[in-house]
Amino acid sequence: MAVYKFKTPISEEDIRKLKVNDVLYVTGTIVTARDQAHRRALEFFKQGKPLPLNLEGLAVFHCGPVVSKEGDKWTAVAAGPTTSTRMDIFEDEFIKNFKVRVVIGKGGMGKKTTDAIAKYGAVYGAFTGGAAILAARAIKNVRGVEWLDLGTPEAMWIFEVEEFGPLAVAIDSHGNNIFTDVQKKVEEGKQRIYQKLGLTT
């Protein structure tokens, strides 16, 4: 296990140094995007419309933050990760089209996303669920918000962060996926137990 500290925009060359079980801290710009922001971003791409922000080399965070506003200034109060499987139907195209280098969330992602991560050079960084206050502490500035019409949780929030993490590299750019590996081992173990007990599935 190695520890890496990268500043955005992150290059593909740097991201390919990471392997599963490494730890990553990100400094610079990250954006939040849940279902609706993913859908709108991909619609913009299909229509040839630019996004409000160039996402190449940045991190996308599956998060619906809790924010407060005083005057014109937003502050992130809590920023826990959303379950990433909700974004699985979008993430491969999102990585391909926008060249994000880090996808942050919880719970892992499936084969399509794993394949896109390997092909285009990205990683999935797992952030601990329930640590929303820890995440918020790393957010030094809310640079802006786009698509607030989608609602506060679904809008695209633009955060400036300092050593955001620790992120456990759970899917790397070499095709490794901790979540599917563990699932496979559990299934194999289950079958061995069933055989010893004389059970069939």
Image (spheres, grey):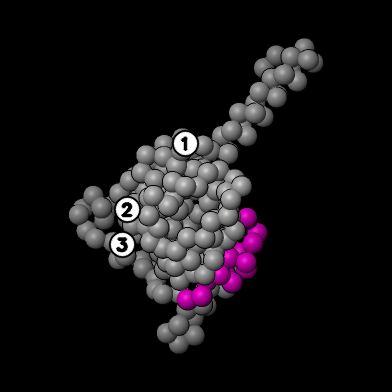
Amino acid type of the residue tagged 3 in the rendering: Asn
The disc label shown at residue 98, or none: 2
Q: Is 133 on the left-hand or right-hand side of 100?
A: right
x and y percentages locating residue 155 in the rendered image: 41, 64
Q: Residue furthest right?
A: 197
Q: Nearer the viewer, mark 1 or mark 3?
A: 1
Q: Nearer the viewer, mark 1 or mark 2?
A: 1
The disc label shown at residue 54, or none: 3
> Which region is colored magenta?
128-141
Residue tagged 1: 175
Above or below: residue 142 compared with residue 165: below
Q: Is 74 on the left-hand or right-hand side of 47?
A: right
Above or below: residue 198 compared with residue 96: above
Per the model, the C-alpha gap separating discs 3 and 2 is: 8 Å
Question: In terms of sequence position, does the residue under pointer 1 or pointer 3 come before the other?
Answer: 3
Mark 1 surroundings: few (<14), some (14-19) or many (≥20) residues within 10 A? some
* Rendered image quadrant of residue 147: bottom left
The disc label shown at residue 45, or none: none
The answer to whether residue 82 of the structure is visible from this angle is no
Q: Residue furthest bottom?
A: 71
Amino acid type of the residue tagged 1 in the rendering: Gly
Per the model, the C-alpha gap separating discs 1 and 2 is: 20 Å
Per the model, the C-alpha gap separating discs 1 and 3 is: 26 Å
Q: At numbered mark 3, what does the secondary structure look like: helix, strand or loop?
A: loop
* Rendered image quadrant of residue 158: bottom left
Amino acid type of the residue tagged 2 in the rendering: Phe
Q: Is 48 on the left-hand or right-hand side of 134?
A: left
Question: In terms of depth relative to the viewer, which is nearer, 143 or 57?
Answer: 57
Tag 1 near tag 3, CB within 8 Å: no
Magenta stretch contains residue 8: no
